[in-house]
Image: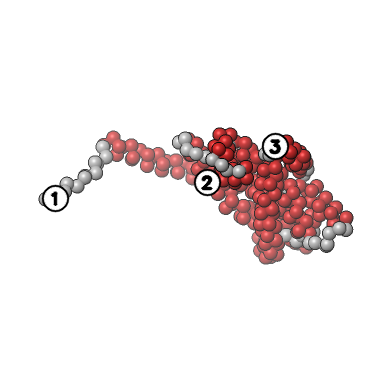
């Protein structure tokens, strides 16, 4: 006795035509994108190249020989930027989370702490980072109460102080976006306030604001280059030294290009996370 096997239903003629149409539409879209991109790039290229001052600009900013000769020193300086970025990211994540939690405390006993956290975030969100770098990098060592530390250490501290205020506000917005019923349900199950924050509120809050957090870290990655004003020999400072030696601005272009290269992966991850959250919202899933 043989068991009848299910035969997959063949797609109808209408469905086949739909598939063919979708494939053709996709190919046309790709072709249109390629052609339009080539046309725009060609217009920009020939428009810039044919300007009267292009030869001088090319020699001053895009000289291949200068780029090759200065690349090793700038790359070595970039390694310092990467190390500063790592320690600053850890410090910002920890300190920013602490500020967000303190600002979210509702008990009147914690009012002084809440006001201090509010004043801190208002102050450092308003101060330009370059001013904070000067105050921390030159002001604090001038007090004479700390041992002599490298410029990159003070630069990292200044970045943490500034960006933790931004991260704190983003996290606080995510925490407030969590429905109050989530907190009440967690407390009714016997969880403490700390457990509710750690197990219920923070996971949902971070999911809601992940793209915003990633964008802040991309901005921080660029601003790490400002530590050069304190004398730290990073990629920007190496480019400045090379520019003084060669009387050419190409080293700055090389440094900027390296910053773009290290930021692209994080930018693409941010875009992917944003698209995934958008799809979840469209299908009614949990964000």
130 to the left or right of 207? right
Q: Would you identify the image quadrant in which residue 197 lies?
A: top right
What x and y, as percent, mark residue 73? 70, 64
Question: Could one spot residue 124 in this view of the protein?
Answer: yes
Whether label 3 touches label 1, CB < 8 Å: no
Q: Would you identify the image quadrant in which residue 75 lies?
A: bottom right
Q: In terms of depth relative to the viewer, which is nearer, 274 or 61?
A: 274
Residue sitting at x 30%, y 37%: 15
What x and y, as percent, mark residue 41? 57, 46
Secondary structure type for disc 1:
loop
Q: Which residue is mark 3?
A: 107
Tell me the tag on residue 272: 2
Question: Could one spot residue 61 in this view of the protein?
Answer: no
What x and y, as percent, mark residue 158? 76, 51
Q: Residues within 10 Å of mark 3 (few under 14, many from 20)?
A: few
Q: Is residue 21 above or below residue 218?
A: above
């Amino acid at each position: 006795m043989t068991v009848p096997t299910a035969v997959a239903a063949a797609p109808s003629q209408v469905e086949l035509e739909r598939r063919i149409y979708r494939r053709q539409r996709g190919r046309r879209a790709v072709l249109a994108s390629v052609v339009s991109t080539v046309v725009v790039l060609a217009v920009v290229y020939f428009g810039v190249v044919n300007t009267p001052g292009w030869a001088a600009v090319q020699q001053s900013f895009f000289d291949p020989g200068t780029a090759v000769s200065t690349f090793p020193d700038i790359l070595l300086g970039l390694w310092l930027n990467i190390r500063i970025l790592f320690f600053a990211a850890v410090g910002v994540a920890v300190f920013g989370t602490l500020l967000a939690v303190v600002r979210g405390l509702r008990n009147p006993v914690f009012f002084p702490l809440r006001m201090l956290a509010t004043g801190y975030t208002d102050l450092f969100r308003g101060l330009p980072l370059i001013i904070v770098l000067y105050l921390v990098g030159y002001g604090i060592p001038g007090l004479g109460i700390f041992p002599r530390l490298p410029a990159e250490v003070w630069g990292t501290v200044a970045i943490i102080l500034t960006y933790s205020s931004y991260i704190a506000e983003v996290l606080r917005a995510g925490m407030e976006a969590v429905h109050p019923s989530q907190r009440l349900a967690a407390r009714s199950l016997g969880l403490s306030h700390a457990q509710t924050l750690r197990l219920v509120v923070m996971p949902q809050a971070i999911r809601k604001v992940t793209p915003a957090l990633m964008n802040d870290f991309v901005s921080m990655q660029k601003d790490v280059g400002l530590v050069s004003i304190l004398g730290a020999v990073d990629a920007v400072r190496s480019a400045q030294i090379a520019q003084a030696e060669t009387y050419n601005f190409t080293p700055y272009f090389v440094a900027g290009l390296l910053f773009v290269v290290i930021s692209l992966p994080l930018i693409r991850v941010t875009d992917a996370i944003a698209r995934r959250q958008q799809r979840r919202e469209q299908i009614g899933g949990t964000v």
